[in-house]
Amino acid sequence: MGKQPVFFDIDGTLLDYQIGINDILPSCRHSLDRLRQSHPAFIASGRTKCFIVDEILNYPFDGFVTCNGAYVEYKGQCIYKKAISKTAISHALQVADALGAVLYLESHDCIYVHHAHFPSHAIFAEKWRMHDHIVVTDFDPATIEVYIGMIIAPDEKSCAYIEETLQADFDVSRHVRQRSFDLTLKGENKAKGIAEVAKYLNVPMSEIFAFGDGNNDMEMISQVGYGIAMGNAVAPLKAVAYDVTDTVANDGITKALLKYGLIEGENEK
């Protein structure tokens, strides 16, 4: 069997902010180094790349599936992208204006923000742990190329209107216990982005590994040959996974890489 691409979600898979793991654990980093000697390692994220934290970007991953599968790159080269239509952008802007909602439209290298009372760049950048120069508030909707969005309702009564009105243009997913919604292209998901990598590298999906923990990893984990759920994953993901490994804190990634022979044990060298 040749090189098998391995895909990693970020939050709850490589990192776990809930328990203070804000960087890749040294043991996991060492395992990734060993993995990359024989197999390409990819990030698979719902985020746009400019929204990914430096702790991940500073590691030399071989490629990125971002924007929930709508933008894919390998070795620094874009191999697939599917942008939101100008009609859908216009509709989202109209809804945001009608409600007084905040709308984020995310491109590969910047985030466009539409709202009359948007906070300063510095406050936004600090909150989301990113550089303020990637936040753009003055833009022409007709000229931008964006792949994913988020809208924040001003109040609870606006939430139902957002879901009903925007579902014709987007897959609308509400954040748990929040008034915010992810806006993704219909039919796009991490698994579709991974399939583009598989096609590019001429590797069947049945030979690909993926690690995840959340509901937005469902297609990815169920459609690759070896979908591995983290020990801290949600129950529905564990139910569709090929296997369940240990938690982030207990080095679940390393344990699975060893189990499936993607890396050798130190005493086997």
Image (spheres, grey):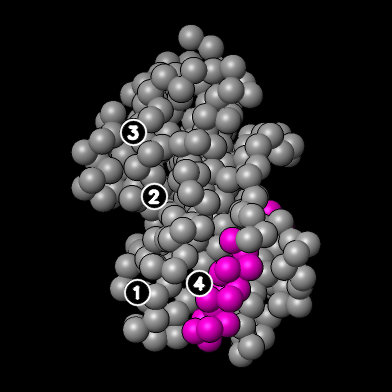
Nearer-N-terminus badge (1/3) = 1
Q: Residue furthest top?
A: 1
The image quadrant that residue 63 belongs to is: top right
- Is label 3 or label 4 in front? 4
Q: Which residue is mark 3?
A: 222
Q: Secondary structure at mark 2?
A: helix
Q: Residue at coordinates 40% horizontally, 28% vertically from top-left?
A: 224
Residue 164, above or below 31: below
- Marked residue nearer the N-terminal end (3 or 2): 2
Rendered view: 267 above or below 163: above
At x 33%, y 50%, the residue is: 215
Q: CA distance from mark 1 to mark 3?
A: 30 Å
Q: Mark 4 highlights which residue?
A: 151
Q: Which residue is mark 1?
A: 160
Q: How far is the residue under mark 1 from the one under mark 4? A: 13 Å
Badge 4 vs badge 2, beta-carbon distance below 8 Å = no
Q: Nearer the viewer, mark 1 or mark 4?
A: 1
Give above or below for 154 relative to 86: below
Q: Is residue 102 magenta?
A: yes
The tag earlier along the polypeptide, 3 or 4, is 4
Tag 1 secondary structure: helix
Left or right: 181 with respect to 82? left
Number of the front mark, 1 or 3: 1
Q: Earlier in the sequence, mark 1 or mark 4?
A: 4
Magenta residues (range): 88-109
The reply to whether residue 54 is visible in this rendering is no
Helix, strand or loop for disc 4? strand
Say which element carries label 3. helix
Q: Residues within 10 Å of mark 1 (few under 14, many from 20)?
A: few
Q: Nearer the viewer, residue 247 or 203?
A: 203
What amino acid is at disc 2? Asn
Query: Residue 248: where, in percent of width, then height?
Result: 36, 48
